[in-house]
Amino acid sequence: MQNLNTEYKSERILGANRLGIFWANFKDGKFTHISDFEGDKSPNILNYALPELLQSKTRVLYPMVRKSYLQNNGVSKNELRGKEEFVRVSWDKALDLAAKALKDSFEKYGAQSIYGECYWWGGSGKIGFGRSVAHRMLSLLGGYVRESGDYSTGAGLVIMPHVLGSSAVYDKPTKWKAVIKNAKNVVFWGTNPIITSQISGTPPTHDGYECMKELKNTKNIKCYSVDVMTNETAKFFNSENIIVRPNTDVALMLGMCHYLLVNNLYDDKFITTYTVGFDKFKAYLLGQSDGVVKDISWASKICGVDAQDIIDFTKKISREKTTILIGRSLQRADHGEQVFWALVALNSMLGYIGMEGLGFEFSLGYSASGAQDKIAPKLKSINSNPNKNAKLITIPSSRFIEALAGEIKELDYNGIKINLPNIKVGYFASGSLFTRHQDVNNIIRNWHKLDTVITAEPYWTSTAKLSDIVFPVALEIERNDINQSSNTNEYILAYKPITTPAGESKSDFWICEQICKRWGLGEAFSEGKDELGWMREIYNEAKEDAKKLDIEMPEFDEFYQEGFVKFDKDNKDSELYTRLSDFRADPKKFALNTPSGKIELYSEVIAGFGYEDCPAHPAWLEPFEWLGDEELTEKYPLHLVSAHSRYRLHSQLNNSVIGEFASVACREPILINPQDANLRALQNGDIVRVFSARGEILAGVFISEAVPKNVCVICEGAWYDPEILGEESLCKHGCVNVLTRDKGSSKLSQSNTSHTTLVQVEKFKGEIKPITAFSKSNIVESI
Ligand SMILES: Nc1nc2c(c(=O)[nH]1)N[C@H]1C(S)=C(S)[C@@H](COP(=O)(O)OP(=O)(O)OC[C@H]3O[C@@H](n4cnc5c(=O)[nH]c(N)nc54)[C@H](O)[C@@H]3O)O[C@H]1N2
Ligand SMILES: Nc1nc2c(c(=O)[nH]1)N[C@H]1C(S)=C(S)[C@@H](COP(=O)(O)OP(=O)(O)OC[C@H]3O[C@@H](n4cnc5c(=O)[nH]c(N)nc54)[C@H](O)[C@@H]3O)O[C@H]1N2
Ligand SMILES: [Mo]
């Protein structure tokens, strides 16, 4: 083990978060700037915003309660949320009110009345990650409603266990090294790792970029990009681009499968040895089951790719060893399950699955996924469900507003019926509902149905502004925690308070502990330890585990002072790890966890569900909105893609100096093709109104040939800034989810369909009002 930190000086302290690992530099005791950590293989600029962001005027500095709620000492005038002032209160007062609201609701209406989804991306750490400690608190209370699956890969996570016997998406990925060693073609299918690898669930070391550089420099590997636009990854690799109409990849894949079938270019041996259900899939391809032949010309008409191009591509990847890397946005769509299933079918026919470095891969779009991992102990984390008797009610991720609306009592989901809970109190931490969730106007219409909204947030986000109780939260660099770098486990990292928390901010851990104290459960929450105590314990357990790996780690105090421990021994066993290689080598011994033990190209289980929107084999089903719908496109002629921004982690950093890199006319940019801009007499920098059947936003025009005609891109995550907060209205700033529809992908996974959205764009002629997203809420000092 090597200790990199030889030149430790007190003028700089190591820090880490989901954007990276960095040095915080000080001058005369003042945090001045960030410099790159030498262990970060490809540092990104995003953390450079930190010194300013720490003190941003958007920080919530004190505990706040909405005026009427405070006056009434509880539930009052829900419809005034977002319109009324907040009153600064003491921590005791805010915590008392929150503890009472949660407890009363639990006692009166049970676990189903409390929503603790607390999403994913705000904060991190093995101890005080807002989501984990909020779940721990609500588990101790006795139960709550949480989500199953996620917004990222919700459809994939539910379909893949039926097909591959595991959720697959988050399984250990194939190593880049194996890909580079073996593949002749690497296909980036709806994935943009040059952008999305910037961040990770735990602090990234960005080794993925090294691997991508190596791929780029390897002669004789051809890169393809199958995407709705020419993205940054396609540009980086100088890929051959296959531009597909949004949401039609399944048709393209089926056309390719048909071509492989009728030209006898498919791997019959792989199909018979490793899959079941090919006959039924074949009948569908040949049109025997529905009268529609899924040939190249059929596919070409739907997906917009030239028939000869599809043929050339299919021939090339069938003749030469190929790896297909697939992204996630294409399954955040109506019938999003089908695209992952069709991908598996196509790869089964190609027959490369399980061959070293070949086949399909879902997860090379993150930080260091697929890079060489290190031998290191695994850090434990705080238990987020310590109460064995807690009633945990799950609803599919992204179905929360459906529950709140109360119109649907029962929801079909993966073969069962789910009773939607009657939610009264929401505890929000680590997530940003109004930028994350679809159809924001629909959230607004239902928001008053919540009796109490509690939000733990470092910033005055729209969710904070639309709350009753707001807790000011300390950032990772203002508190103690511990973490492991992602995904190679090269470092164990100490989070330390680099500065004192802004205003009266406190950590999520402290907040949840204080609420538990009010229920007489403080000790059960903390187990008698503060965050530093937990840190010491978790570190020391890892230190013990390391001994079994023949690794000696320094004492805790030394680690805390240095900020990290580095592990530099490569895990040679996994150097060329390839997904499903064991199954390929021995399909009996390593049978998949599916009913047949094989890859299911037809699923009896799914057939048994009888869902018309999720047939029992990969199938093309028209999305509820797409460019092939002639009637709808008359009114809404552009398909809207809401990709992930290079300048943000979802909504995070939009309120920083970096936000300015990513804005046009102070709005979120809309990327639009020159022809579409011409048609509407638009120029760079114009402010446009973008509208759909759900709502309207303003955006700043950025004309780009990277986007084809009839497609436009507005990245997800611009802060929500309606003309009237708390009412359905135009978003002045460009929050894309005002335009998207809140509908489940199918009865199977009920996942979000944010990428199935048609819009129209026109020059905005109304009065342009100033942006208020980054202003504080109205605050009064007392009532
Ligand atoms: N249209 C459309 N919508 C999408 C997507 C899309 O592609 N298109 N993508 C979806 C995907 S994949 C995802 S993962 C979601 C992301 O959805 P979220 O996870 O909700 O996204 P963030 O904006 O990162 O929200 C994190 C929030 O936590 C706050 N925060 C930061 N640090 C802390 C902390 O220490 N403690 C607490 N309590 N809070 C903190 C931040 O200020 C921020 O408001 O969005 C989904 N929504
Ligand atoms: N910088 C940065 N990195 C991130 C995030 C972030 O917010 N910022 N978020 C992280 C998270 S939580 C997640 S889940 C991942 C998301 O990872 P992804 O979902 O893979 O990322 P996206 O940017 O939504 O989309 C990737 C590519 O898919 C293309 N695409 C969109 N629709 C279609 C389609 O119908 N067909 C095809 N073929 N292509 C399509 C887009 O043009 C884009 O080039 O990224 C992670 N990385
Ligand atoms: Mo995600």
Image (cartoon, rainbow, N blue to C red):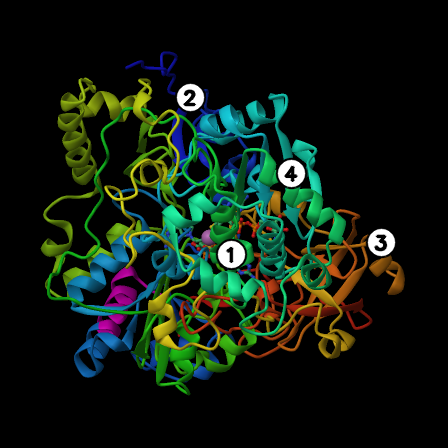
User: Nearer the observer, disc 1 or disc 4?
Assistant: 4
Q: What residue type is labelled 2?
A: Glu
Residue 98 is covered by the magenta coloring? yes
Labels 4 and 3 touching (C-beta < 8 A): no
How packed mark 4 is, by other alpha carbons closer than 10 Å (few <14, some 14-19, many 20 or more), is some
Residue at image location 54% in from the left, 46% down from the top: 266
Q: Which of marks 1 and 2 is in front?
A: 1
In front: 489, or 666?
489
**Distance from label 1 to label 2 (Cα)?**
54 Å
Query: How busy is the neighbourhood of tag 3: few (under 14 within 10 Å), some, or many (20 plus)?
Result: many
Question: Label 4 sits on what residue type?
Answer: Lys
The part of the chain drawn in magenta is 89-102
Give residue 425's position: percent from left, percent from top. 31, 75
303 or 94: nearer the viewer: 303
Mark seen at residue 64: none
Q: Which amino acid does label 3 sit on?
A: Pro
Q: What residue type is labelled 1?
A: Ala
| Residue appearing at x 29%, y 78% in the figure | 73
